[in-house]
Image: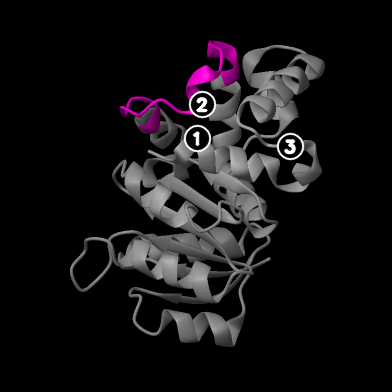
Amino acid sequence: MRVIVVEDSMLLREGLVRVLNGTGFTVLASTGQTLGLLSLVRQQRPDVVVLDIRLPPTYTDEGVRAAVELRRHCTEVGVLLLSQYTEAGSAVRVMAQNAGGFGYLLKESLAEIGDLAEAIRRIGTGGSVIDPKVVACLLNQNRATAPVDTLTHREHEVLALIAEGRSNEAIARHLTVSGKTVETHVRNVFSKLGLESNIADHRRVMAVLTYLRV
């Protein structure tokens, strides 16, 4: 799987490049800014772009704006946003276009190399990964009455885990329940969110979008 790394900290950027090259990825390029990123992606055609949120010149939301641009013009390329802070609105802003092939992780979560590699692979194959702390932040935000409010406590837990990008099997292990129980909860979630069976291939993505709308 081919990757481009965009991170302004030279130490972290080189560290990511070394780790990714050592875990089976091919790092096509690395840079510390978003200037020229769209052209670079079009030229190199990576599977995933790993992108810091706060980049030069203002160190505010350059990464988010670059991610939105990439999602608009290079829809086949996955994007993993990295942040030192829990900025839930940034995730929603990018995912509003399409939740598939997108991830948002806090840098503190990068300690486990296996988790980072798994996240990139999942994003590169069209899945989504959201840091649990970002999910928790979204849970604590006030929302108007919405279909998601009709979910039971357990269904809400299952949807939160789906938003993190976990499979049914992973959810079953996390909740210590059977796979059939998880399947039942997932079906109930889809039904209550109005996601009909004829769009089965996209229901997990649509469920995440519904969950993240604030």
Which mark is first along the chain, 3 or 1? 3
Query: At x 71% / y 20%, what residue is drawn?
Result: 172
The stretch drawn in magenta includes residue 210: no
Residue range corresponding to the magenta coloring: 138-155
Q: Which residue is mark 2?
A: 148
Whether residue 105 is visible here, answered yes or no, is yes
Colour mapping: one colour
- Spatial CA distance of label 1 from label 2 is 7 Å
Q: Residue at x 54, y 20 (%)?
A: 156
Choose mark 1 or mark 3, whichever is in front.
3
- From the image, tell me which residue sits under label 1: 211
Identify the element where label 2 is drawn.
helix
x and y percentages locating residue 39 in the rendered image: 48, 86
Q: Which mark is residue 196?
A: 3
Is residue 124 found left or right of 62 in the rendered image?
A: right
Q: Is residue 33 above or below residue 151?
A: below
**Quadrant, the C terminus:** top left
In which quarter of the view is residue 205 placed?
A: top right
Q: CA distance from mark 2 to mark 3?
A: 15 Å
The relative height of residue 60 versus residue 163 in the rendered view (above or below) is: below
Q: Name the foreground residue: 189 vs 162.
A: 189
Q: Position of residue 148 (x, y in %)?
A: 51, 26
The answer to whether residue 164 shows anywhere in this view is: no
Q: Which mark is residue 101?
A: none
Does the CB distance between marks 1 and 2 fall below 8 Å?
A: yes
The three-letter amino acid code for the residue at tag 3 is: Glu
* The stretch drawn in magenta includes residue 145: yes
Mark 2 or 3, nearer chain start: 2
Q: Could you tell whether 146 is left or right of 191 in the image?
A: left
